[in-house]
Image (cartoon, coloured by chain):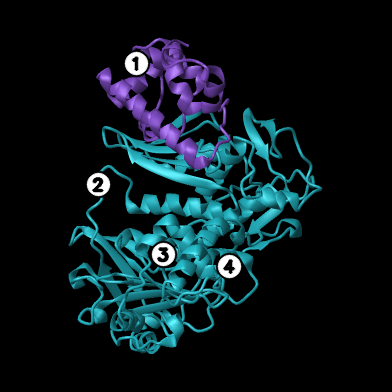
Amino acid sequence: MYTNPQKRNANDTLELRREAGRWLKECREAKGLSQRQLADMIGTEYYTFISQLETGRGRIPPDKYKVWAEALGMGAREFVLALLPFYDPVTYEILFSELSDGERATG
Amino acid sequence: MSVNIVSFFRPAPQSRDWNNQELAEFYRVEASMIRGGVSVETDRGLSDEGDPWFVFCRADTGDVIIHFARIDGDYVVASPAFDSCVRGRHFRPLIESLIESHPLIVPKAKDGGKFFIHPAALLVALVTTCFFKLGQSDAVAGELKSAHPTTPATTGSSVQKEARGGALAVRLDERETTIVLAAIAAAVAWSQTEDASGPAHSAPLISGAEFSNQGAAGAVASLSHASLDNAPGAQFQAHASNDVSAADAAGADAASLPLVAPLTRLVDPAHNQIAIAQKVTAVDNPPVVSHEAAAAPVEAPFVHVAVPVAIAEALNQTVAAYANAGGNGTATNSYATQEVGLVLGGSLRTHLVNDLSGSEQQLVLSVAPAQAAGGASSAPADASHTTATAPTTASASALTAFIAEADLAISQFAAAVPNFQILHSGNDFILYDPHLTPANLMSAAQETFAFPDGSIVSLIGLPTSAHAAPIGS
């Protein structure tokens, strides 16, 4: 399985993933979904995985970005752009360090 | 039987959360893996419906190794290592089926019979399987790897994977086998220490486990172990180190009791709260756990030092600062320092005290054993005391198990007495309930771990009913 490990300081990685978890939780709650409902929509067999992610443990597999975006009512591009600084800050900085905030939002 | 039950103030467990036994099992696996040199960490939580989950993660990347949950009453296990999720009403059969379908450790009974693996070792085997199966397993064993330059390297990882029976089996090289053996040995020995408290020792134990060894085809490492009935030395026992224990034990049939985990958690239904049980024992010449690796190249090493070095260094700084500030501590890298630092981590600083008055220090020291704090002890006559002494033999696994038990006791004490304080002196650490007073001194329960280097960790607890104004308030 592709995991895209980030060889950053472990504490940095955990804090970034916690921020990602908080953002995901906000998105889910904004859609009025329970963790179980979201898990059903994205095809996860165990809905506690959603709780785990929202706590900041682990990450959404890249091959699931599209289905997650759809479940949360977002475009895949928008979703990944919002998630990338948390999951892959190095790549994000390389791609978008020269862009304004508005340009970053649109990629 | 002289059994002192000490109730600690702890709310009743949530009905749907993991119970204490389940959590103890998970944390024992974590401790065993760390002992073996596998760099893992754990986390847990509750879903929005209150269902519990528990994950093991790689400490270096934070990636989840395996996810355990209980959903609607069913146990669920999922891991990227096997790309599927299994579910079942009973935990052990679930783990066994996973091990069978995803073999890292390939048990081969010489008589063709079925292997029985102790539950504690089973879970260690599963989590370790996932750890190695996910690859790039540097862990702490990176140091070991460099010490074995002849170990053949494979692309991206020294873990060799092969198709086997439709599932992806993983074969381990020598260093990885050593890691797994050490972790399993710690888990089994640790569990036996607890099992030994009961009269029935009929639980199936590891009778042999062979590990595929990439470095030497055909050579296997065997962790052989007899049943408890046949191995009287397969448990740690405490021997009394002060007059109180000796007197207590002499007058009661507790003299024949083995030491159980000193702060074993029990649910006291009468009071609907967690209780701490402590058994007094007086056994001279404590026997030791004997796990022997039949194949010399993979005899389980004592790798304890490699893990907590960073924490120990940080602790040493704390202790040094404490000493400079007027405390009587000295910075050392003792077992006690490392284990207290390993278990408590950064929170240690918040518990160290250096402003106790002379009388307050004397109060704490009066419960601590004679070895602690320079021998200034006059233990009360009714207090429940036990002292576990590290094995004097050169058995690495015995020492590892002893240290694992000390770690478990420290962590359980810290959980049961969240506002505990630490009195530090030289190589000795005394973790005590701050509600200790001359009035409740007699009801204090104390457990001490004496390490081979002479350093000591003492735990002093009180029943909830004995709480009064905290020391120093």
Q: Which residue is mark 1?
A: A72
In the rendered image of this protein, which colour is used for chain B? Answer: cyan
Dot 3 lies on which element?
Answer: helix
Dot 1 lies on which element?
Answer: loop
Q: Which residue is mark 4?
A: B398
Q: Residue at x 40, y 61 (%)?
A: B349
Dot 2 lies on which element?
Answer: loop
Q: Nearer the viewer, mark 4 or mark 1?
A: 1
Q: Work out how far the residue at label 3 is from the one at label 4, CA to CA, in angstroms.
A: 17 Å
Q: Residue at x 39, y 69 (%)?
A: B262
Residue B49 picture quarter? top left
Dot 4 lies on which element?
Answer: helix
Q: Which residue is mark 3?
A: B409
Nearer the N terminus, badge 3 or badge 4? 4
Q: Work out how far the residue at label 2 is from the one at label 4, CA to CA, in angstroms.
A: 36 Å
* Image mark 1: chain: A
Nearer the N terminus, badge 3 or badge 2? 2
The residue under label 1 is which amino acid type?
Leu
Marks 1 and 4: in contact by CB < 8 Å? Answer: no
Q: Nearer the viewer, mark 3 or mark 1?
A: 1
Marks 4 and 2: in contact by CB < 8 Å? Answer: no
The residue under label 3 is which amino acid type?
Ala
Q: Taking A68 as reference, is A19 above or below it?
A: below
* Image mark 4: chain: B
Q: Work out how far the residue at label 3 is from the one at label 2, CA to CA, in angstroms.
A: 23 Å
Q: Residue furthest right?
A: B150
Q: Which residue is mark 2?
A: B14
Q: Work out how far the residue at label 3 is from the one at label 1, CA to CA, in angstroms.
A: 45 Å
Is residue A59 visible from the viewing direction of this image?
Answer: yes
Marks 4 and 3: in contact by CB < 8 Å? Answer: no
- Which residue is at the front of the view, A16 or B296? A16
Q: Work out how far the residue at label 4 is from the one at label 1, CA to CA, in angstroms.
A: 53 Å
